[in-house]
Amino acid sequence: MIYAENILICIAIPLLLSLLFLSGSVRKYMAAFLLGMVMCLLSAYINGFLALATGMGERDTAVFLSPLVEELMKLLPLMFFMVLTDVREKTLTMIAIAIGTGFATYENCCYILTSGADNLFYVFIRGFAVGIMHIVSILALSIWFTLAKRLKVFSLPAVSVGVAISMIFHALYNLLVSKAGASTVTGFILPPAMSILLYFLYRHFGNKETVA
Amino acid sequence: MNFFDLCMLIFQIVVLLIILVRSIMVMLHHERPVTMIFFVFATVGYLLSDTYWLAYELLYSQVRMPFAANEIGEWAVFLSLGASLSDRIKKISAPVIKELLGTSIFVAANVCLWIGWSGEWIQDIITGLVLIYFYTNLVRFMKQSEILSNGMWIGLACICVIIIAANAAGFFVPEDLVGLLDTIAYILLFIVMAYFLIRTVISFVGSGKTEILISFSYASLAWAVIFLYTSSKVVYAIVMFLLILSFFLLYMAHEKEVRV
């Protein structure tokens, strides 16, 4: 057992203090990063509750339910910034990256404290895959929201489509890495491969105003 | 999952990959309407859902899924297709109460049957809500494109009632009658499925309005979804094929629309 709140407090205090001395976009980035960490902790609370309430157990909850909870929790601050503040497209992308990074960083901290950090190779691969997974899923969402706004189709179904796809992608990753062997390797390859594909698609479609 | 279902699942994944690559190629070289973007989202959702299911079968084949996360991908498919249809009908100012009520009753009845069969309350209710959105938009679009006469709408409604009644009766009648009731439901489901598929192909080959082709192809897919959720055993595998066939026809319809 780890004391997740204590870990968050320990990591968050220096970052919170730094907010006093920062300004502009760096300050926004840092605030969103902290928010991402808080969302990760709240996700852990909800997952813990669901594990008890559904009787699925910790392992099954982590594999099958946590992708839903985590993607939803990451979405909340993004939606907050998008709906309640009039942020520019670039700022929204930056906020999305910060939320994803904060989320992944805190999750990795807790993972290392739970499972140990003695195997550098595994820790590196895990950090890399989880980092990309959380950043790319929320970044892809923010890009979709921006595009949907531009195309005037930003609505509840459009938001839900994006979230549902990020959830199932995350769930597939969790499923693959849940069993040792070839599936774990496939799982770890999945996020970087997807991010490369998304990068090329975004470069081609995202920068052009050619949507009818 | 039996061997035949597994083969069909792999076949679906291969077809979906081809559709996805071709859709992206079409978008690279032609104008990109919003409807095509939503169709690509639907394809991605469907592909991820099937891949998840396949991965689960390969990793934990003997254990029932504690939570069918692949259904989230299916929700993405229905929401995408519903949003795509919504974009086509947004200029209509007619009230939607009638369509909403009709589809809500039909889907709610189906949800009750699914819960009775699977016992998965939350997932089935969410699937039902998402399907109501998709089907309401579909009915509105079908009315806009006038692909069915009033008499055909009444006939379709009667068939829906008989199918639901036959399936619901299966919970109460003796076991030797269940097979007969299932057969009645399957025959009716097959007749409507065949009608929508044939009309889709005729519309594709003919030189009529693209809206009619799109309307029939969406109707085929929507019917295949209900058919799949109502079937079991061998019929399930056959309907999996019909579903992917409908999806492929939908892709062809979208491609034709973009090229035109």
Image: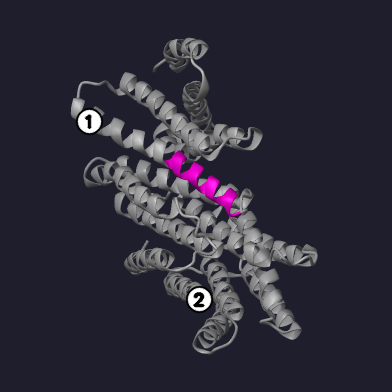
Q: Is residue A179 left or right of residue B148?
A: left
What sort of colour scheme is used for the picture? one colour
Q: Nearer the viewer, mark 1 or mark 2?
A: 2
Tell me: residue B252, above or below residue A137: below
In percent of the image, x 57 and y 57: which residue is there?
A: B79
Q: Main secondary structure of the magenta part?
A: helix
> Does residue A98 appear anywhere in the picture?
yes
- Which chain letter goes with mark 1? A
In x, y percent, where is residue A194? 34, 48
- Which chain letter goes with mark 2? B
In percent of the image, x 49 and y 32: which residue is there?
A: A95
Report the quarter where the N terminus of chain B lies: bottom left
> Mark 1 and mark 2, same subunit?
no
Tell me: residue A62, above or below residue B176: above
Image quadrant of residue B147? bottom right
Q: Which residues are magenta?
A: A137-151
Which residue has dot 1 on it?
Answer: A122
Mark 1: give few (<14), some (14-19) or many (20+) Cα within 10 Å: few
Decide whether residue A139 is among the magenta residues. yes
In percent of the image, x 57 and y 47: which residue is there?
A: A159
Q: Please, what secondary structure does the residue beneath circle 2 have?
A: helix
In x, y percent, where is residue B237? 42, 71
> Does residue B120 appear anywhere in the picture?
no
Query: Which is nearer the eye, B105 or A206?
Result: A206
> Which amino acid is tagged 1?
Tyr
| Disc 1 to disc 2: CB gap under 8 Å | no
